[in-house]
Amino acid sequence: MTNKKKIIISIVVGIVLVAIVTIATILIINVINNNNNATKEVIPTETTAKDLRDQAEAARKNADTAKSKELLLEAQKQYETLPKTDANTNAKADIELQLNLLKAQETPTPTQ
């Protein structure tokens, strides 16, 4: 009787150990995959850059110049990596002008 109990206990312990190892392996793989996904950067496209410009315009309308400037700078970086086309060149010039307008809004004008 005790021999059978020892066998049953060792089988249960073995199953528990296999379950623990399997769960630990799954958790480790998930953590590694989540870290890999977090480090991937967004691949710049004209659509993502335009979305950033639209968000910057909405932030400017809400008088949030800091966020608008940050979004415009990010859009500018994305346009730098895109192929040189007339549309992209015009967009880069437009962003430069918008940044200059934001800078002009931030600096107080001297009174006469």
Image: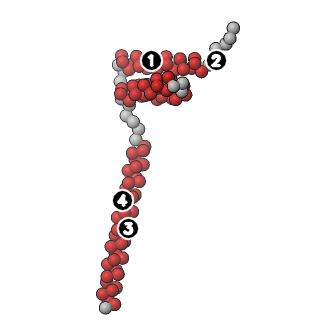
Image quarter of residue 77:
top left
Cα gap from disc 1 to disc 2, whole angstroms: 23 Å
Residue type beneath disc 1: Asp
Q: Judging from the image, what secondary structure is the residue with disc 2 in?
A: loop
Q: Position of residue 2 (x, y in %)?
A: 34, 90
Q: Are marks 2 and 4 in contact (CB under 8 Å)?
A: no
Front position among marks 2 and 4: 2
Q: Are marks 4 and 3 in contact (CB under 8 Å)?
A: no
| Residue designated by label 2 | 108
Q: Position of residue 87 (x, y in %)?
A: 36, 18
| Residue designated by label 3 | 20
Q: Residues within 10 Å of mark 4 (few under 14, many from 20)?
A: few
Q: Judging from the image, what secondary structure is the residue with disc 1 in?
A: helix
Q: Judging from the image, what secondary structure is the residue with disc 3 in?
A: helix
Counting every numbered tag in the picture gives: 4
Residue type beneath disc 2: Pro
Q: Earlier in the sequence, mark 4 or mark 3?
A: 3
Q: Earlier in the sequence, mark 1 or mark 2?
A: 1
- Check the image and report above or below for 29 versus 49: below
Q: Earlier in the sequence, mark 1 or mark 3?
A: 3
| Residue designated by label 4 | 26
| Residue designated by label 1 | 94
Q: Are marks 1 and 4 in contact (CB under 8 Å)?
A: no
7 lies left or right of 55: left
Q: Position of residue 74 (x, y in %)?
A: 46, 29
Q: Residues within 10 Å of mark 1 (few under 14, many from 20)?
A: some
Cα gap from disc 1 to disc 3, whole angstroms: 58 Å
